[in-house]
Image (tube, rainbow, N blue to C red):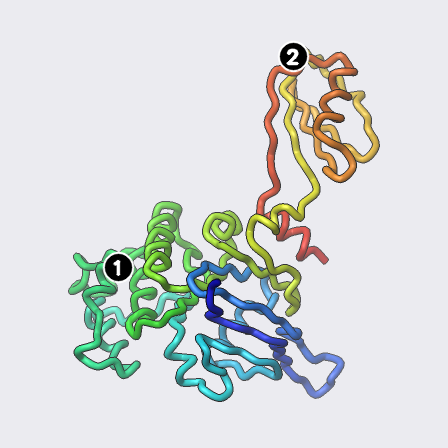
Amino acid sequence: MNKIALSVENLTKIYSKQNKQNEIKALNNISFDVKQGEIFGLLGPNGAGKTTFLHTLAGTVIKTGGKVNVWGFDLDKNPRQVRASIGIVPQEVNLDAFFSPRMLLELQAGLFGVKKNEKITETILSLVSLKNQANSYSRNLSGGMKRRLMIAKAMVHQPPILVLDEPTAGVDVELRKNLWSNVKKLNNEGVTIILTTHYLFEAQEMCNRIGILNKGNLVALDSTQKLLERMNNKIVKFYTKNLNGRKSLSLNGVKFDFQGDIITVTYDKSNYSFDELFSYLKQNDLEILDIKTDDANLEDVFIKLTKS
């Protein structure tokens, strides 16, 4: 059974104003756990509370109520141990242009009080594929290299938990793949990963479990697969022969879209089975050449759970 890396219990953050009616509940009594060794995704639209949560972990925002426990340390009672247990990679790339990766990592290790004989600078440079650029000025690094260097900075004190805030924002597809490859490598080394991302297909591909925030509330918390199973709608494309512009199909609660000789059928799996739909089309004298299904993706789940 996996140990708990992060435990959040009834976490609340209220931004107070003079008029209490205008108080903003950035986080509204949210509770969840992150298991040791997993990749956990925290998703939500802008203003959902993700940034407030990350700032709470970092200690730059003081929570209004609730408990946060990181690697066995209480955020209120042991803030220094909590900070030592996590490495946070912010969305913004912030590096000294005239420092090399090796110099930056040595400096960061010093800020965390890492002893000389405990520094793992060379190991981290290899882990994030920056060994060959170790002595180059940061200003000369590519965008992807700078992102990897930000991850390396967060790892100098060997935290068991790495928090990534929109790590691939503004990064092209090739660099994004490279970055995720490095994140998976870290995870395989035993690092627990918590990430926020706007790229839902990435979350679907990367995360073991996902929490979805909306307006300060945790509206979903489950494995990626179980979240996908919540979607009842099924989409099936029927490739037919000689449809000849026929658009007279009608079945209660079923949507038919026609494009050339392709019929796209959207239906609720709780109301109809695939066999029933297939039989209906055959009864209408349609010659079906091929069938393709489009399963729900995480974007469908996200829209369903966060729509007003």
Q: Residues within 10 Å of mark 2 (few under 14, many from 20)?
A: some
Point out the residue furthest to the right here: 252
Quadrant in which the C terminus is drawn: bottom right
In the structure shown, which secondary structural element does the residue marked by tag 1 occupy?
helix
Q: Residues within 10 Å of mark 1 (few under 14, many from 20)?
A: some
Numbered circles on residues, count: 2
Observer-side mark, 2 or 1, equals 1
Seen at 78% across and 15% down, the residue is 284
Task: Establish if 100 lies above or below 269.
Answer: below
Q: Earlier in the sequence, mark 2 or mark 1?
A: 1
Q: Position of residue 299 (x, y in %)?
A: 59, 48
Viewer-side residue, 296 vs 89: 296
Which numbered circle lies on residue 127?
Answer: 1
Q: Is residue 265 above or below residue 176?
A: above
Q: Is residue 302 left or right of residue 97?
A: right
Residue 105 on image: x %, y %: 24, 72
Kindly identify which numbered label has been placed on residue 308. none
Where disc 2 sits, the SS reads strand
Residue at left 63%, top 46%?
A: 229
What residue is pinned by disc 2? Answer: 241
* Point 36% across, 62% down: residue: 190
Rendered location of residue 155, percent (x, y): 32, 69
Q: Position of residue 228 (x, y in %)?
A: 61, 47
Residue 62 falls in image quadrant: bottom right
> 89 or 296: nearer the eye?
296
Residue at image point 64% right, 27% down: 237
Q: Amino acid at mark 2?
A: Lys
Q: Amino acid at mark 1?
A: Leu
3D distance between C-alphas at marks 2 and 1: 55 Å
